[in-house]
Image: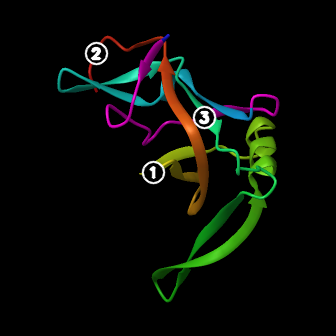
Amino acid sequence: MIECMYPDIYLHDSVIEKIEFDEKNSSITIFCEDENGFKVKKDGKSYRAKNARIEIILAEETDIDYEFVSMVRYIPVFRIWAMARYKEMTLRDFIKKINSKKIRAEFVDEFYNGYSVYYKVSTGLRKECSFKISYKDIRYLYDGTDSEAL
C-alpha cells in the first residue's frame, strides 16, 4: 500500500464503491472503484490510483447518527436551474444506501478545514449531496497507478 496526502491527490470523478464503518475503532473506510479511483500527482503528471481507499479516523465528537447528509435536486424554473431541497439523511443511512447500491456516488469536490473534510458528491442526474466529517486522521491509500498519465 502506498500512502499519499492532500494536495497530491484529488477525488474529482472518483466513484465510491462501498463504505465500511468500524464502530470499535471509530473509523470510516471509503473504497473507490478500480477504474474510477482518485487521481495522484507524480512528477507533474496525474495518474489514476488502483485499489484506492480513504481511511478516516473519526474525531471523538463525531457520531454518524447525528452527522447529516444534505441531498439536493436541481430543477428547471423558467429555463433557469434552481436548487430544491431533495432530502436529508444521517451519515449511517447514506452508508447503507451506498453499500446496497441504491445510490451511486461520484466525488465532485472536497474541502479541508482544520480537522474537518467536506465532501460534495453527485448521486445522479441533477442530484448532489454533501456531508462533513470531523477527523483525527485521514489517509489516502492505493496499490499503484495506471502506467499512462491522464
Tell me residue 17's x, y (percent).
65, 31
Disc 1 secondary structure class:
loop
First in residue order: circle 2 vs circle 3: 3
Mark 2 residue element: loop
Could you say which disc has been placed on residue 56 in the image?
3
Q: Which mark is residue 40?
A: none
In-image side of 141 versus 90 (left or right): left
Residue for badge 2: 148
Front residue (pair 16, 131): 131
Q: In the image, is residue 147 above or below residue 15?
A: above
Give the x, y percent position of residue 143: 48, 11
Residue drawn at 61 percent across, 45 percent down: 105
- Res 114 label: 1
Q: Could you tell me which residue is drawn at 32 percent across and 31 percent down?
A: 8
Specify the color scheme.
rainbow
Amino acid type at circle 1 is: Gly
Which mark's residue is nearer the viewer, 2 or 3?
Answer: 3
Magenta residue span: 2-25
Between 62 and 131, the one nearer to me in the picture: 62
Q: Quarter of the image for the C terminus: give it.
A: top left
Tell me the CA gap for discs 1 and 2: 34 Å
- Residue 130 is left or right of residue 37, and the answer is right
Q: CA distance from mark 3 to mark 1?
A: 14 Å
